Amino acid sequence: MAQEEHVPSRSTRGAAAEPTLSAVATPAGQEMQDLAVQPAVSSPSRDAWRRFRRNKAAMISLIAILGVIFLAIFAPFLHTTDPTLSNFTGALDQAPSKHHWFGTDGLGRDYYSRILYGLRAPLITAIVGTAVTVVLGAVIGVMAGFYGGRVDSVLARVTDVMFAFPGFTLALIIVSLK
């Protein structure tokens, strides 16, 4: 009998349920050694996902974020009216109804449609901002790791200066330098 190899992504819970033989059976008349459970190695990402799934607040937040992203992506198919269309024929400041789910504003524009389309700009800004941050951080980290020494020290001090100022103050300083 061949012995099973360890699979790094197999969880430790699954390994306890799958015992393997610690030795091959010997000729007739000799007893077979006891089954030994060998712990399997679990990957950090699998452990993180398992902990994340068990956290109810995290799962509810994930579902809410995915729902908002879904609404933003499919806004053209989910809106009830044109979000920029003003309706001055009696739809001013209406309460929620079957035609205007969240009601209308003072110009007769549908709140629901405006919210759906309004989700798009902040989500795009967040995605682009995160992507730029990841790329810059990776480039700075690779440069610091590759060159080391003085380059690493200079990049570390520049990063420390960036963290020393609050974001709004830093933005004001950068804008005032133009």
Image (spheres, grey):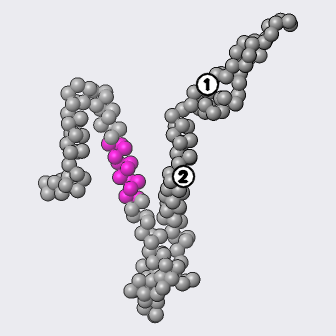
Residue 173, how many percent across, how many down? 16, 54
Residue 32, how many percent across, how many down? 78, 12
Q: Please tell me in which quadrant of the rendered image residue 120 appears.
A: bottom left
Residue type at numbered disc 2? Lys
Q: Check residue 128 for magenta coloring.
A: yes
> Which residue is denoted by mark 1 in the rendering?
39
Instruction: Bin the neighbour count of mark 1 within 10 Å (Cα to Cα): few under 14, some 14-19, many 20 and up.
Output: some
Mark-to-mark CA distance, 2 and 1: 28 Å
Q: Check residue 117 for magenta coloring.
A: no
Kindly identify the residue that appears in the image at 67 percent across and 22 percent down.
37
Residue 80, how many percent across, how many down? 53, 78
Residue 130 in the figure: left or right of residue 5: left
> Which residue is denoted by mark 2 in the rendering?
56
Residue 8, how many percent across, how many down? 58, 28
Q: Is residue 16 above or below residue 175?
A: above
Farthest bottom residue? 89
Q: Secondary structure at mark 1?
A: loop
Q: Is residue 85 shown to the viewer in this render?
A: no
Q: Secondary structure at mark 2?
A: helix
Q: Please tell me in which quadrant of the rendered image residue 1 appears.
A: top right
Looking at the rendering, the stretch of residues picked out in magenta corresponds to: 124-136
Residue type at numbered disc 1? Pro
